[in-house]
Amino acid sequence: MSNEEIIQAFHLMWDNFPEAVTITQKSREIVAVNKKAAEFGLTPGIKCSSIGKPENHKGCQCDKAVDTGEAQFCTYEGAFGKAYGYWIPIPEKPEWVIHFGVGYAFDYPKIDRSPSAKTTESLHGLTKGTDLEAAIGATAQGEANATMMYYALARLAKEQGLNAVASTFIGSANQEAVHAGFYATLNGKVPKDFWQFVAGVAKAEYAGKTKIKTLADMVRAAGLTAAADEMDVFAEQEAHHGVVIDELIAKYAPKDAIKSGKKWICGVCGYEHVGDAPPEACPVCGQPASVFKEKV
């Protein structure tokens, strides 16, 4: 990864951060600055140790971050009270660290995390059944497709040795996934009281292991061994998702959250629905009610 690629990735990640961020060498020479740092007059080429009073640099952890290859931090008094300084090594460039402070330039709001704190108003289902539902649904699907596209692009970039490009695409994919979940929440695509739903999703995840393993065998039989080997890993991950969901249910779900009743299994993905009749469409794979069979 070239110096230029590292600097480009730095700007993509940090330019809009509300605090000053720099790439700084062990020699203390600044290599790159984000927008906020530039507003403070910081520029590449100067030494950060020349900024302000010497005593302000007594807690500098740059050397330790470079020498150990591990992120370092310290606390100090900033403009808005206690602040935190960070030095994060860049593996591709051992002499460089990303350096920034939190609480120095931005007054972060205090968040009440006590049980009595006011709960954030839910966005769940606000557009369901309205004139906006179709447009929001189409947007959710578009964002989901974009997630798939960016992850595919990231993989292709990695195959070509373009790790900085791949990292950028992965960041975009993660954002698109968040967007898709936001729009799906607006349309109420999953129930707000979700424990019964995720219990059915766990069944689909367990079934996913068998389905992916079967597909992997077909891919291997076609001579695509490397792809099949990776799909075998994916199959185990699918089953592990089910295990994780079951653990979450056991730890966090209310005792009466998982109800008994008729069970309907999606013949495509294995999602398990509880109710007098199957859902109009599978909430996991989207297949119609006709693919569901009652579990006996």
Image: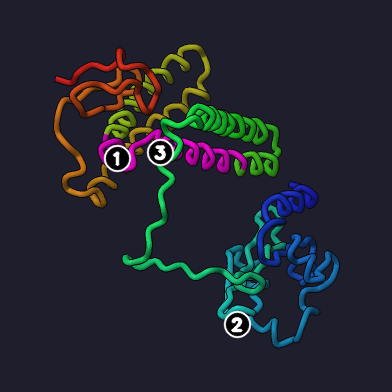
Residue 263 in which image quadrant? top left
- The residue sitting at 84% across, 71% down in the picture is 46
Mark closer to the observer (2, 1): 2
Gap between marks 2 and 1 measured at Cα: 45 Å
Q: In the rendered structure, find residue 77 and report the number of the disc placed on it.
A: 2
Image position, residue 85 (x, y; %): 61, 72
Residue 125 in which image quadrant? top left
Magenta stretch bounds: 172-199
Mark closer to the observer (1, 3): 3
Residue 178 inside the magenta-drawn segment: yes
- The residue sitting at 71% across, 50% down in the picture is 12
Residue nearest the viewer, comparing 26 with 146: 146
Residue tagged 3: 125
The amino acid type found where label 2 is placed reads Glu
The amino acid type found where label 3 is placed reads Gly
Image position, residue 203 (x, y; %): 28, 30
Residue nearest the viewer, comparing 253 with 250: 253
Dot 1 falls on a residue whose secondary structure is helix
Residue tagged 1: 243
- Sequence-earlier tag: 1 or 3: 3
